[in-house]
Amino acid sequence: MDPRLKRLIQGQGPLYVATFLFEHTGRYYGARIEHACFQGLREGLEALGLHPEGPLTFLPYRDSNGVVVPQPGESLTQAIYRIDTERIRNSFALLAPIYHTQYDGGISFEVGYAAGIGLPVILLLSNYFQYKHDHIAEPQRLPPLLELLADDVLCEGDFPFSGLDPDPQSYRELIEAAFERIERRVREVVRELVLNYPGQRVVPDPPARPGYAFLEFGGGEYEYQLIMAERAQRELEALGWHVETARRYEANSNDSLRLGAEQDFQNAVTSELIVTFGDGPDMNPESGAIQGYLRALGRKVVLYCSSTTRLYVGPEYDMRRNLMLTHSADQVVLRLADLASAVGSPAL
């Protein structure tokens, strides 16, 4: 029996359900998805004649924030980060519902972290649109680096774009039917995962190239990313670093977009130093996923985030970015002008 399947049965390695947590709709959706995962796990185990001895799912916030006890020297958010990453490392698999036009940076980190330890990663899409890049004919369902890290992508965003019945009750029933379809699909996929568990992948961990720095500033999807990356590149090259910059969005075809994402990924995992870009309303999801993957490999990551506003709940949660991103970085640099002094020269 696969060790992770055995731990699932023993209640020591539940399936990790990454969810939006900052507002009620995300928590509601996450709770419904988690229940569908629970049903699928139970059905799969019953089909194998196995009987679980403990919890089958782990839902962040519910299962971490509510029971967290910081260790000496830890803050509350550091303790949550420790518990959540420990749960991912011991998990059976990770399922992440991702939606909206800006995917959650914390969820993206968890996707990358799970992929970085070789866990099966299932992404659940519920957007009814795709992405259409100016120079690429075929629409994309996901940003390319997220597509690269996923083992399975469930596209369940079908919803009428026009011709809706104006009756309020009919509209509510249509939304509920969409929820039920998503839950049914999740339950079926998770059940199949139990019955045909692929096991933990061996993750390539190539040696880092001494003196190489990689700038993951969003891949150049926006002009300002390239402008900021060029400035950071000059700063680091002046210190003696050999600098490479993510440029996947310079693609002009579906194939070149995929190859660009693969090249950016390869450059990231083989660099001694990685700088991720945290500016914007939320961190770029691909940058967040790369940061998670590299943290799983134990690589050095510097997060540049110049935000003058923070996510604030009280003294126990006062963060410029999602706690998973803040606490996984070796350093957080608030000004681009301070990047060089924070990083220093390569130890060649």
Image (spheres, rainbow, N blue to C red):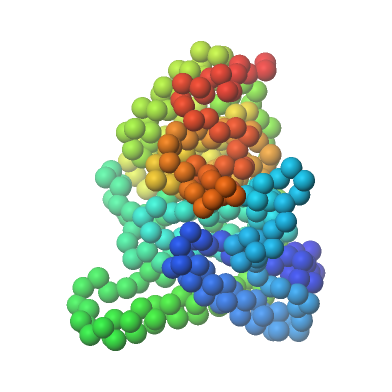
Q: Is 156 displayed left or right of 210 in the figure? A: left
Q: Residue at x 50, y 80 (%)?
A: 184
In the image, residue 82 sits, relative to residue 50, either above or below, namely: above
Q: Position of residue 19 (x, y in %)?
A: 53, 62
Q: Position of residue 136 (x, y in %)?
A: 30, 47
Q: Residue at x 36, y 55 (%)?
A: 101
Residue 194 placement: quadrant: bottom right
Residue at far front of view = 315
In the image, residue 231 sits, relative to residue 152, either above or below, namely: above
Quarter of the figure with the C terminus = top right
* Closest to the observer, 114 or 151: 114
| Residue 4 shows in the view | yes
Q: Residue at x 45, y 62 (%)?
A: 23
Q: Residue at x 62, y 42 (%)?
A: 328
Residue 40 placement: quadrant: bottom right
Residue 341 placement: quadrant: top right
Q: Is 111 displayed left or right of 197 in the figure? A: left
Q: Position of residue 69 (x, y in %)?
A: 72, 56
| Residue 112 shows in the view | no
* Closest to the observer, 91 or 316: 316
In the image, residue 24 sits, relative to residue 224, either above or below, namely: below
Quarter of the figure with the N terminus = bottom right
| Count of numbered circles in the view | 0
Q: Position of residue 188 (x, y in %)?
A: 55, 78
